[in-house]
Amino acid sequence: MTAKILEKEELMLIKKLDFNVCLQCGRCTSSCPIFPKTGLNARTLVRKSLYFVSPLTVHPPLDLSDVNKVWDCTTCNICVVRCPRDVKPMDIVVGLRSILIERGEVPPTIIDALENIYKFGNPFGLSRSKRVEWAKDLNVKRVSEGNKAGLLYFVGCVPSYESRAQEVARSIAITLNGLGIDFSILGEKENCCGNEVYSLGEKGLFEVLVEENTKLFQQYGVNKIITTSPHCFNALKNRYKLNDIEVQHYTQFFADLIDKNKLKFSKSIDKKIAFHDPCYLGRHNNVFDEPRRILENIPGVELVELRHSKSRSICCEGGGGRMWYDPPGEESRLAEDRVNEAVELGVDILAVACPFCLLTLEDALKKTGNEDKIQIKDVMEVVRECL
Amino acid sequence: MEIIVCVKHVPETAEADLVIDESRKRIKTEDLVFDINEWDEYALEEAVLLKEKYGGSVTVITIGPEDAEDTLRKCLAKGADKAIRVTDKAIEGSDGYAIAKILYNVVKDLRFDLILCGAQASDDGYAVVGVMLASLLGIPYATMVRKMEIGDGVAKVTRELEDGLEEIVEVKLPAVLTIQTGINKPRYASIMSIRRARQKEISVLDLKAVNLAEDEVGEKGSWVIVDELFVPVRKKKGEILSGDLDQVVSKIVEVMKERGVLK
């Protein structure tokens, strides 16, 4: 397409990031779980971008023809956590993505997901009228004009439309109803939170989603939001500016209820369970204890730790737009490594708290032929079984 | 190269529940999402690629209500230079011939080397507008174009036929080419680029501006009129016969005799 050299306006998309202090130590690349799989090299991308923010006036041009690997990044945040200088290589990846987005040079499957989110409010391109089918036989209140919603359960696109993940939404709604907690959902009005839209660099679309969703929260008097997905949690808490609204992931909400003795279990489940820390709950937002507290309180649960746990958790490869993109030539997904790790540890259940992890790990379970060895379940599904 | 692209603003129907409206000739569209016709998207991309290679300009034309400007703006964001929208109440009910007449009247006084249209539209699927436009203009055309190379005053195009067969033809320019999907990879138009495209002007023309009378368009000006649009009634499921080959064949012959198909 157009010239491969960066234009002035495009520079602005990365120039405002403060990364002059990069030492080029390479810790980011060596920590990156995708680097050994596809060659995505965070250090090189930072070095190439550095030329434009450094005092150097003569430097090699940032040739965009070899930055297409930026689409491989899952935004797992390991590079940010490991950097000794507080550089955020992930932000530079997002900045480079936004340059490619503006140029229109985007992999077709990602184009489809973004256009679907704009047109239908979900990446699948499914009709808005089907967004609440997961709740059709449940007593779930929709927000209504003139009534203050108070607590809002922000369901998210995957739990709304995808049949396996719908079980998680159902588990959350059933548990809330069982506890007599008053809550509402946005229903057909709910739009994608845009966390992945932001990670993909589509700033314009992200702003549209922020505006529309924020308007809805204000219109219906929402003062607290709980989410199914850590991605929605991250977007609403850190990327939206919701000043008077408290945002929690469902694990924080239910751990809180356990601490207050309000969530009790009547059945036990004698299983060995390992919790898989989702990137957007753990590494991005430092929420490690709450999901474990919930599982430990369920009678019969033996909670064990995987080799790579908490901030060392292996990314399932679902974030950063990767649910809609396969790097050419990639042979297997990290989720398969994660499943093998769990099988090696000898657990009964690999517990998750993210719809992307749920889907990628279920797929990996089938691909590695381990369906009869372990089960993948969301924390909330285990909770619901033992209520 | 001066290129004209004809685009259509159509409803997205793949995942929608379609309802026939009271006239029983159309579907209800109030709750549907609209976007550029998929084939036209490939045509537009091809035009912009040609412009990037050879210079010149790309003009997009659509016939439709104000909402259709969303499609025009997407095209402008992707690299089209000018946009024209023709709108008039009388156009309602137009078939491909009437649409071709309108496009002909817009285009005949413009300078162009190439007119690109999508091979068909996803809503009514007639695949005639491009061909009729070429005939009215008296210029050559080729349909289902999967690849094209521009030479000196000619376009060498590869046409997609059935069964993987391809036909290569040389078409003298100016010509109309109808574009098949897969000819290229359409670029993405970001929200910010679509916003910036608001600065480019869209000319809006009515029937008078294109020198057409009301009876030359709409149902009156059409050769094909929709009688009825309906969802086929689900009949009883077929019967699956069991047994070995000889038994099944005898049963089939019996049924055919019963139904009067075999005498």
Image (cartoon, coloured by chain):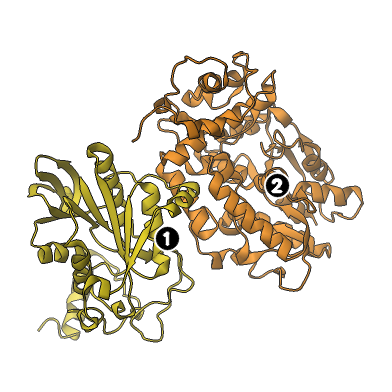
Chain colours: A orange, B yellow
Residue kind at label 2, given as amino acid type = Phe
Asked whether residue A281 is in view, the answer is yes
**A19, above or below A151, in the image:** above
Q: Do the CB atoms of the residues marked 1 and 2 lie less than 8 Å apart?
A: no
Against B247, residue B172 (above or below) is above
Label 1 neighbourhood size at 10 Å, few (<14), some (14-19), many (20+)?
A: some
Q: Which residue is found at the position 86% from the left and 54% from the top? A: A263
Q: For this rendering, which residue is in front, B241 or B61?
A: B61
Viewer-proximal residue, A47 or A156?
A: A47
Q: Which residue shows up at 51% across the image and 64% down it?
A: A127
Q: Position of residue A4 (x, y in %)?
A: 38, 28
Q: Which residue is mark 1?
A: B70
- The residue that appears at 33% across and 72% down in the rendered structure is B87
Q: Callout 1: helix, strand or loop?
A: helix
Q: Nearer the viewer, residue A264 or B146?
A: B146
Look at mark 2 in the image and give the residue it sits on: A233
Q: Secondary structure at mark 2?
A: helix
- Kindly identify which chain the residue marked by label 1 belongs to: B
The chain that hosts pointer 2 is A
Quarter of the image with the N terminus of chain A in it: top left
Q: Is residue A309 visible?
A: no
Q: Quadrant of residue B133?
A: bottom left
Residue type beneath disc 1: Asp
